[in-house]
Image (spheres, rainbow, N blue to C red):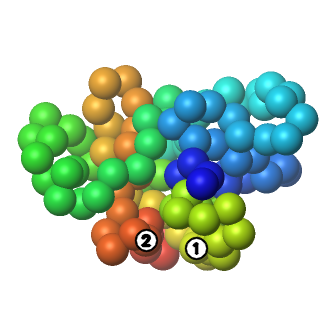
Amino acid sequence: MSVERIRIRYNGRNIELSKFGVENESGAFAICANTVASLLKTEVRRFAFKGVIEIMQGQTLLLSQRCKVIDIRAYYTGLSDFEVPQEIPRNSYCVGLYENSGIYLLKQDNLLIHYPLS
């Protein structure tokens, strides 16, 4: 069984991240470390990727702040080693929660919640 992970686009490369860190066969360190990009009002900042949680869990995190997470390309549920990922369109953002100096992505029915950037 595989681990739940996302594929991000960083510096022209695709990098797979899980809550444990960079997931790649070579074991090479990625310059982005274990971070995702969040779109703020005036800038883009990188925060630690803490994992993916169901929307029902996210509703209990009352002190959390929702955020727009960009450059996510795909989501793997980790249910199978041979699964087809959920592809995220290029000009979209995923909904995240900022808590404990990091970002959790929100999912519903095992799919990341995402919307077009406007």
Categorize mark 1 by other alpha carbons within 10 Å: few (<14), some (14-19), many (20+): some
At mark 1, the secondary structure is strand
**Can residue 71 be seen by looking at this rendering?**
no
Whether residue 38 sits left or right of residue 28 in the image: it is left
Quadrant of the snapshot with the N terminus: bottom right
Res 86 label: 1
The crowd level at tag 2 (other Cα within 10 Å; few <14, some 14-19, many 20+) is some
* Residue drawn at x 41%, y 50% as measured from the top left: 52
Image quadrant where residue 108 sits: bottom left
- Name above or below for residue 40 compared with residue 87: above
Query: Callout 1, which amino acid?
Result: Gln
Q: Amino acid at mark 2?
A: Leu
Q: Is residue 61 above or below residue 85?
A: above
Question: In the rendering, at what x and y percent does residue 27 appear?
Answer: 83, 30
Residue under numbered circle 2: 111
Assess whether mark 2 and mark 1 are in contact (beta carbons under 8 angstroms). yes
